[in-house]
Structure formats: C-alpha cells, structure tokens
Amino acid sequence: MDLQDYEYYEARAKDVKLEDITSSQHNADILAMLRNCHPHFTLIFITDESDYYDYHEFVVCEGDDLGWLGYFVGRSKELEYLNISDLPDNLNIDSFLRGLGHNRSIQTLCICTDIGESCFQTLVPFLRNNNNLRDLTFTCFNIGLQCARNIASLLGQRSSLKSLNFGSTDLGDEELVEIASALRTQPQIDELSLCHNHIGRDGCVALGNVLEGVRNPNLATLNIGSNVIDDEGLHALVAGLINCHNLTSLYLHGNGLITEAGLRSLSTLFQSDHCQLECLDLDQTNIDNNGVAVLSAGLASLSTLKKLNLSNNHIGDQGMQDLVGSLVNCNIEDLYLSHNSFSVFGLRSLGTLVQRATRLKSLCLRNNAIDDEGLQ
C-alpha cells in the first residue's frame, strides 16, 4: 500500500459501509472492532474456511476487500497476534500485505501457507519497521526451495525478531542452507525452532557455520528435534553452538541416527568454557550404555543443568551408574528416564542421586524393568 493507496483508504475509513466491503456480518464486525480500536481485540486469524465462525477469525470469501482489511490491520494499535492460514488460490493478498506494512503493534506473525515471492517482498516494510515484532512462525505447509529463498530474502532485512519457528514445514537440507545464510543478519534471535522436518548433515553444516561465524550470537534456545541428524551433522552443529554463549536449552529428541561419535561431539559442547546449558532433550535418540558413558564425560562438567530428558532410549544398569556419577554435582530439577532398560540395580544407583540432588522436583521412571522390590 503506497502513499496514494493509504490516503484513499484514510479519506473514506470513517464513512465506508463495512457490509459493502465484506462477505458476511461476522467479517464486518471484525473490521468494526479494528476501526474502533477495540481494546480486547488483540489477535486475528485470516483463513478461507472454518467449521464455525470464531470471534477472531476473518474467513475470506468472495466479496471481501482485503485492501480494507489490510488498512484497518495496519492502523491498529491493539493487535498483537496475526495468523495467515490457507487462502483461496486465486486470491491476491498483496493489497492486504501492503496495508499490514503500516502496523507497529503486532508482536507475533504466523504464516501457514506459501504466500508467493512477490508477497514475501511486500512483507519487507513490516519486518523492517515494526519494532514490536518478536516472533515469526512458518508452520504446517511445505517450504520448498523457492519459498526458502523468498524467506531468506525477507530475513535479510534487519529486524527486532527474537524468535523464529519453522516447525513442521518439510524443511530439508537445501532449504535450510538458504535460510541459514540469512540468519547472519539476525544475531539478536534468541529462539530458533526447526523441529519435525527432514534436516540432515548438510543443513547442520550450514547452520553450524553461520553460528560459528556470527559475533556474539544471542541464541538461547535451539529446537532441532525430530529430524535426520547424523554424527557428522551434529559435529558441525556443535562447532557453532560452542560460540553461542547464551545457549540454555537444546532439543535434539527424535534424531535416531546419532551414535557414540555424535554424543562425543556433544560432550565437547558441555565441556566448553562458556557452556551454561540448563535444559537438554535427548528423548528417542537410541542412546545405550556406551552412549551414556560418552555423554557422562561431558555432563560431569555441566553444573548448570536443570532438566534432562533421556526417555525412550536403551539405557541399562551400567548406563544408570555412569549417568548418576555425572549428575551428582549438577543442580538437576527434572529428570526423565521412562522407557529404558534398567532394573532394580540401576534404580539403586539412582537412589544416590535422589539423596544428593536437593533440588530434584520431577523424576519419571515409567516402563523400565523395575519390580516391586525396586520401588521399595
């Protein structure tokens, strides 16, 4: 929306009949709340279908003028959350996005559809000028290579973003290589989620190189669980994470290709001078006794650790003994060990930790080989 467009809408905003520019009374009511700056109307979902009309859903149908919707969203000072979901294929949402570019109040933008190359470019002023924008999420659609390039171009703009989420977008190595390159201009990001995708070795190498090359990255939380990361990929990723001195939470769950070699690389992160990890999730990563022995060497140096998830692995009695030995000096608060293979003997080792870990609040031991004697 250029200056001429904005002046057109501005001159007519007070008098326009909302029923004439919308397809339903429900959508007209939403525009009325935006126009009247309703203090409690802080989030909006834009979609092309709904089983029922939610208070916050603008369901786009024939007869809706998205230019007007963009204008009212752009001038809103109350909106904090915007979700763009599935839209009709023949719909040009460029006029809406030009209006959105004037908004300065939205803190979270969630995009659940590929809006196309030109529309990503139209989003640039919004990303660049909205200093309140903190969270940008892409989810529940397939990010192909061209879409990844469009997102990378968008992220090439400096912004106030703190959180980036690409969960469940079929993101692969090629796509992450494109997006990672743009993260060099976003060193202030403190939360990055890439879970439930198809990221492997090359994607981890690209991300690791970026994190290693950025000066003072602010990354505190990385969720890269449920991907296809192998040992070499993890090794490359760790090289970048060592440079992330603010990292407190790392989620690697569901990466079943990691072996002892990868865990050995991970231990070097724990032993690095500036590591202050508090939360580590290795659920469902095929860790056995040998893996625990390798991991324990690093965990022994990690006094900051508060939450550890090792559920759904293959940890036996010897593994439990090694794990307990590495955690006795930690301030562990939450420990998850369900669905492993240890028996009463491993449980006895754990008893030592329970006695010494004065801050322990949660301990999960479901589905192990523990009999009644062990529970006593």
Image (spheres, grey):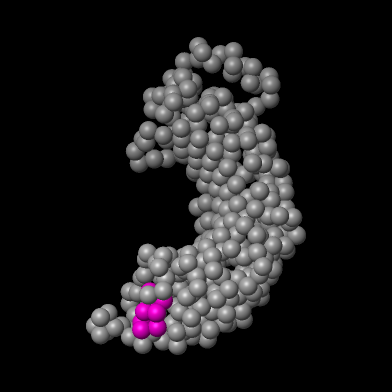
Q: Quadrant of the N terminus?
A: top right
43 relative to 215 in the view: left or right: left
Does the magenta segment cover residue 195?
A: no
> Does the rendering let one see residue 37?
yes
Q: How many numbered marks does the figure carry?
A: 0
363 relative to 271 in the view: left or right: left
Residue at horizontal 50 percent and vertical 52 percent from the top? 140
Is 229 above or below relative to 346?
above
> Does the rendering let one see residue 233?
no
Residue at horizontal 39 percent and vertical 40 percent from the top? 50
**Residue 294 picture quarter:** bottom right
Is 17 above or below relative to 218?
above
Q: Pick the residue in front: 22 or 54.
A: 54
Q: Position of residue 132 (x, y in %)?
A: 59, 36
Is 277 above or below relative to 190?
below
Q: Position of residue 221 (x, y in %)?
A: 56, 57
Q: Pick the residue in front: 56 or 60.
A: 56
Does the magenta segment cover residue 352?
A: yes
Q: Pick the residue in front: 204 or 361.
A: 361
Residue at horizontal 63 percent and vertical 72 percent from the top? 271
Q: Quadrant of the C terminus?
A: bottom left
Q: Which residues are magenta?
A: 347-354
**Residue 230 picture quarter:** bottom right
Q: Position of residue 226 (x, y in %)?
A: 51, 66
Residue at horizontal 41 percent and vertical 24 percent from the top? 29
Q: Position of residue 296 (x, y in %)?
A: 54, 79
Q: What secondary structure do most residues of the magenta stretch adopt?
A: helix
Q: Pick the residue in front: 285 or 172.
A: 285
